[in-house]
Structure formats: structure tokens, C-alpha cells
């Protein structure tokens, strides 16, 4: 069920972003990737674990860096970042001890991330996603 909800919410969010016109600003998808990246930091704070907070910093910084690179160059980097974060979610419980992460989160987040990345990729392939380059 976590997978279905994750995919459903990603598609609903993508359709809303397109329908509302928010997609006209090429920053919207990089910002989504940044928010996704910092959620494990939030869980570390909620779990009261400074060790988890520190251990989550490097991966978070990498995903934020990818989002900025994608904003400045090509949104294909953001697609890679979203799908990459989905893969990261699969392995996260085996690599990190973060007491604030709900048991269901990695499954939900993986589904959301991959579906969001696929949605953006489809928009880019069809030439209908944000195309304006950063000047």
C-alpha cells in the first residue's frame, strides 16, 4: 500500500504542478528534490539523534548539489536525482540508524521519488516541461 500511495501522490503532485502553471518556473522540480533530500534530516531531529543528523548530512548535501546543478544546467540532473534518491531509500535502512524514520517511509519515499522522476522525464521527453535555461 505504501508504494501505491507514493506513486499516486507523486502523479497527483506532478499533474497539479502542470495544471496550475507552477511548472513554468524551472525551479519547482529542483526545490522538490531539495525538500525530499532534507526529510531524513528532519527525521533525525524528530528522533532526537545528533549522530543520525550528522550521518545524514553528506547524502543530503549531494542531493541538494544535484538539484542546483539541474537547475543551472539541465533538468535531466533532477530526474537522475529523484530516481537516485529512490534507490537511496531502498538501501537507507541498511546503511543508517535514524530512529526518527517511520518504518513505512523508505517504501513510500522510494515510490514517490521514482514516480516523480519518471513524471518529469516524460515531460522533458515530450518537450513540454520547463525548458528555459538558467542565464
Image: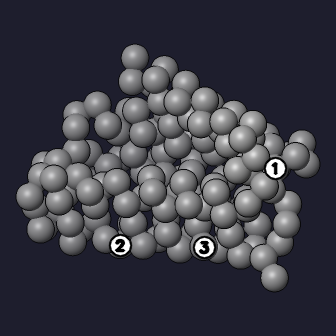
Give the image location of residue 22, x and y in percent: 70, 50
Judging depth in this view, the residue of 35 and 93 nearest the camera is 35
Which residue does the image show at 39% across and 24% down from the upper left?
2
* C-beta proximity under 8 Å, tags 1 and 2: no
* C-beta proximity under 8 Å, tags 1 and 3: no
Give the image location of residue 88, x and y in percent: 42, 51
| CA–CA distance in space, label 3 to label 2 | 15 Å
Give the image location of residue 16, x and y in percent: 66, 36
Which residue does the image show at 60% across and 29% down from the upper left?
12
Which residue does the image show at 76% across and 67% down from the upper left?
74
Q: Give residue 1's quadrant in the image.
A: top left
Judge left or right: residue 6 versus residue 69.
left
Q: Which residue corresponds to mark 2?
A: 58
Give the image location of residue 106, x and y in percent: 35, 39
Residue 129 shows which numbered tag?
1
| CA–CA distance in space, label 1 to label 2 | 30 Å
Judge left or right: residue 56 versus residue 22.
left
Which residue does the image show at 78% across and 55% down from the upper left?
24
- What crowding class fits label 1: few (fewer than 14 Cα within 10 Å), some (14-19), or many (20 or more)? some
| CA–CA distance in space, label 1 to label 3 | 17 Å
Asked which secondary structure carries label 2, the reply is helix
Judge left or right: residue 124 versus residue 50.
right
Asked which secondary structure carries label 1, the reply is loop
Judge left or right: residue 4 versus residue 120.
left
Q: Which residue corresponds to mark 3?
A: 68
Q: Which of label 1 and label 2 is nearer to you? A: 1
- Of all residues shown, which one is farthest toward the right? 127
Amino acid at each position: 500500500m505504501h508504494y501505491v500511495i507514493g506513486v499516486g501522490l507523486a502523479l497527483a503532485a506532478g499533474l497539479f504542478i502542470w495544471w496550475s502553471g507552477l511548472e513554468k518556473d524551472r525551479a519547482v522540480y529542483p526545490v522538490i528534490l531539495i525538500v525530499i533530500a532534507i526529510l531524513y534530516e528532519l527525521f533525525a531531529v524528530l528522533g532526537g539523534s545528533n549522530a543520525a543528523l550528522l550521518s545524514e548530512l553528506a547524502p543530503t548535501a549531494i542531493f541538494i548539489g544535484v538539484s542546483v546543478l539541474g537547475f543551472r544546467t539541465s533538468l535531466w540532473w533532477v530526474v537522475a536525482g529523484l530516481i537516485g534518491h529512490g534507490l537511496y531509500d531502498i538501501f537507507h535502512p541498511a546503511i543508517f540508524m535514524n530512529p526518527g524514520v517511520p518504518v513505512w517511509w523508505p517504501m513510500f519515499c522510494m515510490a514517490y521519488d521514482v514516480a516523480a522522476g519518471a513524471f518529469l522525464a516524460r515531460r522533458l521527453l515530450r518537450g513540454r516541461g520547463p525548458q528555459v535555461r538558467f542565464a
